[in-house]
């Protein structure tokens, strides 16, 4: 079976099976659920206006803790800082750094043009509020909040900064573009994870883009956690 065929088989299985599966192979819901209970409830999801599930939160921490020493995470779509906090929690073990991109509450007219309409623009968290939240959570010095759009941040990216974990949860209509924009800056073996990438828990446009992302090149450790599809790019 070619790499593309085995990726397609993985996605087909991830998206088609219903109900709990055993701890084996690519999808390990019992493990994910235990992780969610133990580690996915640290931050107040409601207060942050967070949009990730407890299982997904716990696994973000787990994957961030697996980057190399001094590793770099890029987050596209930070919103109130919930996923950012879980990523930073894992990253702390590695003395790593996160660059979290979001327009926050800047220029709402521009946001109406450049973002999808899936996240309400009313009461969007400010960059200052999120920064304060992350500091309160003990992450001072570990993060840079970039107020703007992934495509702009990618165009200005310093090519000497290599990325170990790319987390895509921004505009649901441009997941593939986000991947392609940052792909040149990924370290070999970097993890890419895409949220809302399941027909039952996510959005069709993201599902379509995820098929394209993981059909290109070679991937290791493909995993499916609720609406997240992730893998490490090895070629
Ligand atoms: C689904 S929310 C992110 C939720 C967050 N990850 C969490 O765990 O709570 C998507 C966010 O991405 C932002 N966004 C939309 N387009 C973007 C882009 N091109 N670059 C960066 N952020 C973007 C939206 O404004 C919104 O704040």
Image: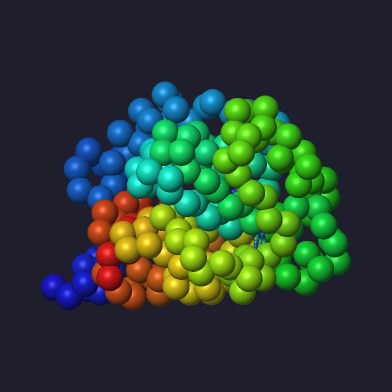
Displayed quadrant of residue 70: top left
In the rendered image of this protein, does residue 38 appear above or below residue 121?
above
> Is the N terminus in the top left, top right, bottom left or bottom right quadrant?
bottom left
Residue drawn at point x = 21 percent, y = 68 percent: 6
Give the total number of marks visible in the rendering. Answer: 0
37 vs 17, left or right, is: right
Q: Residue most toward the left?
A: 1
In the rendered image of this protein, does residue 40 appear above or below residue 148?
above
Q: Position of residue 13 (x, y in %)?
A: 28, 58
Residue drawn at point x = 81 percent, y = 53 percent: 105
| Colour mapping | rainbow
Residue drawn at point x = 31 percent, y = 59 percent: 189
Quarter, ligand 1 = bottom right
> Is the C terminus in the top left, top right, bottom left or bottom right quadrant?
bottom left
Q: Position of residue 168 (x, y in %)?
A: 52, 58
Q: Position of residue 210 (x, y in %)?
A: 43, 67
Q: Is residue 224 visible?
A: yes
Residue drawn at point x = 35 percent, y = 36 percent: 32
Displayed quadrant of residue 222: bottom left
Q: Position of residue 122 (x, y in %)?
A: 83, 50
82 vs 80, left or right, is: left
Displayed quadrant of residue 107: bottom right
Q: Is residue 52 visible?
A: no
In the rendered image of this protein, does residue 144 appear above or below residue 132?
below
């Amino acid at each position: 079976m070619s790499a593309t065929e085995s990726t397609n088989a993985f996605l087909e299985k991830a998206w088609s099976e219903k109900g709990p599966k055993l701890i084996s192979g690519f999808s390990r819901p019992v493990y994910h659920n235990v992780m969610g209970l133990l580690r996915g409830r640290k931050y107040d999801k409601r207060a942050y206006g967070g949009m990730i599930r407890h299982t997904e939160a716990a696994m973000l921490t787990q994957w961030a803790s697996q980057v190399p020493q001094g590793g770099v995470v890029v987050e596209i779509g930070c919103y109130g800082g919930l996923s950012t906090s879980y990523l930073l929690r894992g990253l702390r073990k590695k003395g790593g750094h996160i660059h979290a991109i979001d327009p926050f509450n800047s220029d709402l007219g521009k946001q109406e043009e450049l973002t999808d309409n899936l996240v309400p623009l009313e009461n969007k968290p400010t960059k200052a509020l999120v920064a304060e939240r992350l500091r309160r959570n003990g992450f001072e010095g570990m993060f840079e909040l970039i107020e703007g759009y992934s495509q702009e941040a990618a165009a200005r990216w310093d090519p000497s900064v290599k990325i170990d974990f790319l987390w895509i949860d921004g505009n649901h209509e441009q997941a593939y573009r986000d991947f392609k924009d940052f792909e040149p800056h990924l370290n070999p073996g970097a993890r890419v994870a895409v949220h809302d990438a399941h027909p039952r828990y996510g959005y069709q446009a993201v599902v379509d883009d995820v098929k394209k992302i993981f059909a290109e090149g070679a991937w290791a450790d493909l995993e499916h956690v609720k609406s997240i599809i992730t893998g490490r790019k090895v070629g």
